[in-house]
Amino acid sequence: MKAIMATLFLVSMILLSGLSSVSYAQNDTLVVYANSDKTLDQIISADVSTGGAQAHKVYKLVSTDTTYLFAAAITATSNISIVGKLGLNGRPATIQPDVLPDASVPGTFLILNKNGIKALLKNLYITGQSIAGSVNSPNAIGIIVKSDSCRLEVDNCVFEQWDQYALNYQGNMDKLFVYNTKFRNMVNSAGQWYVGEAVRNSGGNATDSLVMRNNTFFCVNAYAAAPVTGKILKYFEFIHNDVVWMFKNPFFAFNVTNAKINDNLFYAAWAGGISKTEYPWWDQLRSPEKGSLIDFDTLNVAIAKIFDPQDSTNANVRMLAEAKRTVEVKNNTYFWPQRVIDYIKAWNDTAHVDSVITATWMNQRTTNMFADSTTWPGFVEANNQNVDPGFGPSIDSVMDNKPEFGVGFLEYFKAVRTAKISTEVWGYHLQHVMQGVNWIPQWPLPEAKDLKYTNATLLTASTDGKPIGDLNWFNMAISGVKNYSSVVPKHFTLYEAYPNPFNPSTNIKFDLPQSGNVTLKIYDIQGRLVTTILNNEFKISGTYEYKVDLNRMASGIYLYTLQQNGQMLTKKMALLK
């Protein structure tokens, strides 16, 4: 069995005796290597203080030539960060389940199990496939947030072949931030075609914030984001994401109160449609309707009172609350390839167990909400277009029955719609674990070339003038929050960029004592806009840090300006090439 060896560096950077597997390090960081007699969960779970909190706040995974194994879930009851060191070509550290003595496979990697704790996962490839290639089906869940008011941040990770959910939260008023992450080949192998989901709230609780930027959801059965808004969802942001080949709907978020869904690319999303048997209540909460990619509904009285407490005793509270909702849907692109359209049309023209209603961009109920500026003055929809992005040829090959694509999307569709689904899977270059060797997933990801689309119009069609969809495919993504503090800052502060001078990249850090919309822009010395890092985007109170790359700019002095709630701060930085 593969295992893990942990080494802690002294502040002096001198190692302890080679007979010891651990030693203490500076900055609360434990450096973990692969290949010894302990699994990753054994090391992290054993590394606790007398009170039960993690003895170290950061676990740094530095091996990229083999995988880290877990034999049981890590249950965190204090703040925890698990961060990989990037290897050749940006390869992240890989984590996968072991196979237990009874031949079973552990189903969950990490559980947050105390109110108010925070977790960061960064630079990791977390697969649900065990060392034998098997998965815990149908119950595999990568990360579970079980407690209230927790914060989970995921940045630059890959989640693959998690049969149920990649990220699951069950607490009340949790916050999730997902940046630069790939969700791929998440297809349930136990015949449950409606799961294999990226982010899901399964606890029926209220959600504080769900923020998702620069992610790709590729060959996922259902739901890029499912906060399941039976309770209030205070803030939802879905910006610069790719949703490519999804059997079911990308969202389950009907009753958002403050949302931005901008600059995304939806390609063959909800390609499996809705059967006549499922209509009209499939994934509808309060009123019957045909499903669509963008699908909203009215608030019920309970949510209206929470969202609009000053009007909670008014008999007309629902309509008063509706007028205060702010939902922005701008500069998105959507497209269904002709081959799948023709296939479903032919299916409906032939006698089958059930025919299928194909999804649309926006159903009639949602269209009416955006059109009614009296009832919903905060609903804004603009510049959304049905355009083929021009992906490379392999992207549509997921329709075909080939070893690297499973049975293919069309055969999977047929099995589902004839109620004969069993263990079939579909996907794109499914990873096949090789036993007896130091197996690691294919890297770079095989879709990297063909997801870099060729439609020139879309390359500048987003609200910020950048390409529509996930910017990572164009090497333009800005990283998420680098660090966060458990202490709310006291002052609105913009720090000096570091390094400064710089070439070609630097870091910009700022403090927000209050939550609210934030703008961060960079100008040249003539006052001309160079790039927009944040464009009136909602951020909760905290400390933020962004890496900025000006590789394409000339040497000179640049200004960076931070704005929030009428306050503005500006500082200088120098690019020296």
Image: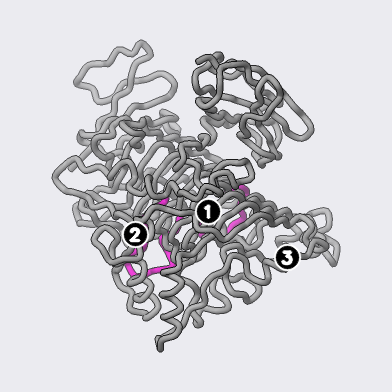
Res 319 quadrant in image: bottom right
In the rendered picture of this protein, how many numbered marks are placed on residues?
3
Q: Dot 1 corresponds to which residue?
A: 265
236 or 137: which is nearer to us? 236
Residue 320 seen in the figure: yes
C-alpha gap between disc 1 and disc 3: 22 Å
- Residue type of the residue flagged with mark 3: Met
Q: Which residues are magenta?
A: 183-210
At x 37%, y 30%, the residue is 60
Q: Is residue 85 left or right of residue 476?
A: left
Q: Is residue 13 left or right of residue 364?
A: left
The image shows residue 436 at horizontal and vertical percentages of 14, 45
The image shows residue 119 at horizontal and vertical percentages of 48, 39
Q: Do callouts 1 and 2 mark residues in contact (Cβ within 8 Å)?
A: no
Q: Dot 2 corresponds to which residue?
A: 427
Q: Is residue 63 left or right of residue 237?
A: left
Q: Which of marks 2 and 3 precedes in the sequence?
A: 3
Res 30 quadrant in image: top left
**Considering the image in quadrants, where does the N terminus appear?**
top left
C-alpha gap between disc 3 and disc 2: 36 Å
At x 33%, y 33%, the residue is 89
Q: Which of marks 3 and 1 precedes in the sequence?
A: 1
Asked if the magenta segment contains residue 243, the reply would be no
At x 24%, y 37%, the residue is 66
The image shows residue 410 at horizontal and vertical percentages of 36, 70
> How dense is the environment of label 2, judged by Cα within 10 Å: few (below 14), some, or many (20 and up)?
many
The image shows residue 439 at horizontal and vertical percentages of 21, 43
493 to 446, vertically: above or below: above
Q: Which mark is residue 369?
A: 3
Q: Do callouts 1 and 3 mark residues in contact (Cβ within 8 Å)?
A: no
155 or 219: which is nearer to us? 219
